[in-house]
Image: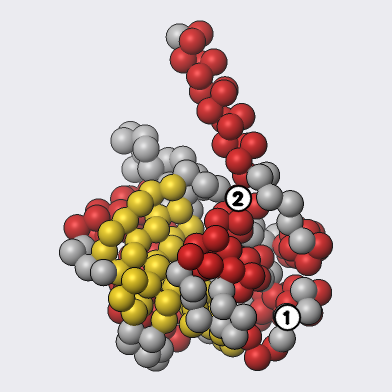
Amino acid sequence: MKNQHSQHSVKHSSWAYAEQHAEEEPALVQARRRAENLGVQPVSQGVASLLTVLAASARAHALVEVGTGVGVSSLALLRGATPDAVLTSIDYEADHIHAARETFRDARLASARTRLITGRAEQVLARLTTGGYDLVFVDAEAAHAVEYAEQGIRLLRPSGLLIINDALDHDRLARPAVRDDSTQQMRELERRVLEDDRLRTAMLGTGSGLLVAVRR
């Protein structure tokens, strides 16, 4: 038992080290302070770094984000996307959109590179063009994760990326005894994505879990 506890401690230390692998730019540091004041939980530092890498690897030109927050993940995605990329980001809280605009101003991001929409994601996503996007990032409540993921798959071009944040439901997904509604929703999402012949998937331990799928 002592050895198992030691291994767990080392694993957690490695995770924490990896989360702080890359230093964040000042605009993101300031955005995190803004998030704390608003009571918003942005993606972790490790997730932000990975989003930049994934957007770069996909050479993303047209991106969709569900859950703008204060713009941490938005800016991370655009830092990896092509120089002329445009991000459509959706959030139902107007103060979140306002905070994100402040983040983009701090980062000297051209306004033409973002299309910020205040509204319900299920309504906005339904109006977006089928097969018109290179990357879809979902950072939303688990209750809507399956619906948003299905819409995201529809929006993707071949080789496009679907990325779901908090896919491990704050480490509850791996514990079979946990039957919380959010955990059940994320298990259902994982099952559907794994069984979808249109996708190739991976579950990553970064942050509180990222489910990544590429459309074939």
Q: Which quarter of the figure has residue 107? A: bottom right
Q: Residue at x 24, y 59 (%)?
A: 192
Q: Is residue 203 above or below residue 159?
A: above
The number of discs equals 2
Which residue is nearer to you in this view: 58 or 6? Answer: 58
Task: Give the residue at the far top of this rendering.
Answer: 2
Which residue is nearer to you in this view: 130 or 95? Answer: 130
Tag 1 residue: 109
Secondary structure beneath label 1: loop
Q: In the image, residue 135 lies at what x, y percent?
A: 44, 73
Whether residue 9 sits left or right of residue 168 in the image: it is right
Secondary structure beneath label 2: helix
Q: In the image, residue 2 lies at what x, y percent?
A: 50, 8
Tag 2 residue: 46
Q: In the image, residue 76 lies at what x, y percent?
A: 63, 66
Q: Is residue 119 above or below residue 164?
A: below
Type of amino acid under label 1: Leu
Type of amino acid under label 2: Gly
Q: Residue at x 61, y 56 (%)?
A: 49
Q: Quick check: can you spot residue 140?
A: no
Q: Is the C terminus in the top left, top right, bottom left or bottom right quadrant? A: bottom left
The local crowd at label 1, few if under 14, some if 14 to 19, many if 20 or more residues have their Cα within 10 Å, is some
